[in-house]
Image (cartoon, rainbow, N blue to C red):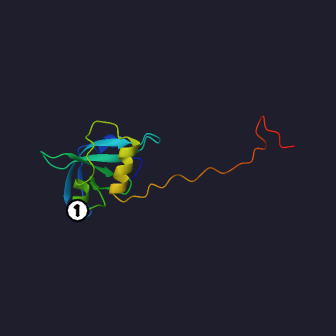
Amino acid sequence: MRTDIDPRNLIGRKALDRNGAKIGTIDEVYLDDATGLPEWAAIRTGLFSRDAFVPLEPSELIEGALHVPFDRALIKDAPDFGVGRHLSPDQELQLYHHYGLDISAPPPLPDHDFGNLAGTDDT
């Protein structure tokens, strides 16, 4: 997903699945707590149905519609956390697992040897 897109401009746009079938309309966009970048979209899947969360990272905005690279059935079966609330890290993890996305931990920081710790005596 291009990060230069204003998330407010996504609301109200159509969302299509990997086959080009309409999933629904984007209701809300959720930002990553750490980066502030758009991370999830809540898509209203029908007049009387719930919103389904989809990841924005592998999705693309093409000709004014959000193209989500997953099947409609998988999207509709996504965990339902309700909209209008903050997604917890555990809920995001559940969504990543649902979509089979790799959420590997960031690489470890380099190990620096800063010498002896204060209060230790290695003599």
Query: In this view of the protein, can residue 89 be seen by the observer?
Result: yes
Classify 109 as above or below 74. Answer: above
Horizontal side, residue 5 vs residue 115: left or right: left
Check the image and report above or below for 71 versus 34.
Answer: below
Residue at (20%, 55%) from the top-left corner?
23
- At horizontal 42% and vertical 44% (from top left) the residue drawn is 37
Q: Residues within 10 Å of mark 1 (few under 14, many from 20)?
A: some
Residue 56 visible in the displayed image: no
**Image location (x, y in percent) of residue 58:** 37, 57
Q: How many marks?
A: 1
**Residue 41 on image: x %, y %:** 30, 47
> Residue 42's quadrant in the figure?
top left
Image position of 105 (left or right of 47): right
> Residue placed at 30% from the left, 36% from the top?
85
Residue at the limit of the structure toward the bottom, as seen here? 19
Q: Residue furthest right?
A: 123
On screen, residue 85 above or below 39: above
Percent across and percent down for residue 114 are 75, 44
Q: Which residue is mark 1?
A: 20
Say which amino acid is labelled 1.
Gly
User: Judging from the image, what secondary structure is the residue with disc 1 in?
Assistant: loop
> Which image quadrant is residue 48 in?
top left
Q: Residue furthest top?
A: 119
Comparing 39 with 79, the one in front is 79
The front one of 7 and 123 is: 123
In percent of width and height, residue 66 lies at 28, 53
Residue occupying the far left of the picture: 48
